[in-house]
Image (cartoon, grey):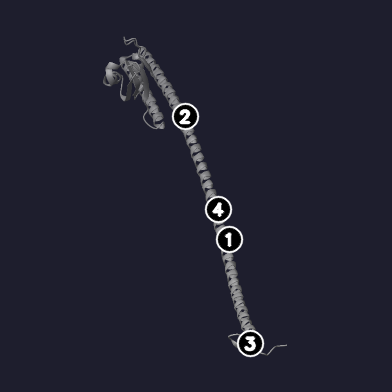
Amino acid sequence: MENDEPLNVPGRGNVNVDRVVAETRTRKGGERRRADASWRAESSAHATHQHELAAKVDTLSKDIDGLRSRLQQAMDERGSQAQTGVRAAEAQWRALSETVESIQFAMATLEATVEAAAFDREVILVAAREEAAAERKETVQLAVKAAVQAALAVRAATTETDAVAVAQAAAAAAEAEAAEAEAAEAEAAEELGGTKRYVVTFSGFPSVMGEAAVRMTFDSFGEVSDLSIGMSGDGLTCDGEVEFRSVDAAMAAIDKYNGVDMGLGTTLRMSI
């Protein structure tokens, strides 16, 4: 039961205790309510802010995931492009290697073909020389035979006029045979691709003679189409090749100088 009697407080006059307590409670209650409202407002603000931060974190996480995905995709694409480039380079290398091998094979085939052609040409030249020599031998034999027949005819002739006529006929026959042989030889040379020439290999001429003197020596046997001369290893003699336009000149030079002692401890050697 509330006491409405005023409280006698010294120096303060009469004070109503219940009213003071009620006012105090009212003031405290208001303060608590205001504190509660403030706390609820702050809590709501904190919750809102926390929600906003959570949303931002979620957005950032999504952005990070997107960046990570794009980065991985770019790395994958770059790796794929690099692998494609490597495969392309390997393919180009293989193609180049195959091309080089093809060129090397073609070169080897060409060299073999050239060697075979050179061998065939040498065989043809040797055969042509042998054929020309045989034809010349046959021509000489025919000429000798014709001359013998002419001599026998002259001997058997009863008059000088008959003898002269027979001799002239024999000479004409021999000239015809020689001309025919020369024509056959020229035709064979033309089939070989040009004028026929005869190359004589020589060694043993004194080096002091020089090219001019050696050429004059060979010119005395017939027309020389080419001459190549060089110093031998000892420096005392020279060797080389001389090319004649007729087999007679070549054979005459060989018959004249092959095996001749030059007086320096060396011997001339010639061969065709």
- Residue behind mark 2: 120
**Is tag 1's residue or tag 3's residue first in the polypeptide sequence?**
3
Comparing 240 with 179, the one in front is: 240
**Which is closer to the viewer, label 1 or label 3?**
3
Q: CA distance from mark 1 to mark 2?
A: 75 Å
Residues at circles 1 and 3 in contact by the CB criterion of under 8 Å: no
Which quadrant would residue 177 be assigned to in this image? top left
Which label number is shown at residue 8? 3
Three-letter amino acid code at the position of disc 2: Asp
**Is tag 3's residue or tag 2's residue first in the polypeptide sequence?**
3
- Residue behind mark 1: 69
Q: CA distance from mark 3 to mark 4?
A: 98 Å
Three-letter amino acid code at the position of disc 1: Ser
**Is tag 3's residue or tag 4's residue first in the polypeptide sequence?**
3
Crowd tier of the residue under label 2, counting other residues whose Cα lies within 10 Å: few below 14, some 14–19, many 20 or above:
few
Crowd tier of the residue under label 1, counting other residues whose Cα lies within 10 Å: few below 14, some 14–19, many 20 or above:
few
Residues at circles 3 and 2 in contact by the CB criterion of under 8 Å: no
Q: CA distance from mark 1 to mark 3?
A: 84 Å
Residues at circles 4 and 2 in contact by the CB criterion of under 8 Å: no
**Which is closer to the viewer, label 3 or label 2?**
3
- Residue behind mark 4: 79
Three-letter amino acid code at the position of disc 4: Gly
Looking at the rendered image, the quarter that the C terminus falls into is top left
Comparing 195 with 104, the one in front is: 104
**Is tag 4's residue or tag 2's residue first in the polypeptide sequence?**
4
Which x, y percent locates residue 185?
Answer: 39, 27
Q: What is the secondary structure assignment of the residue under circle 1? A: helix
Residue drawn 39% across and 25% down? 181
Three-letter amino acid code at the position of disc 3: Asn
Residues at circles 3 and 4 in contact by the CB criterion of under 8 Å: no
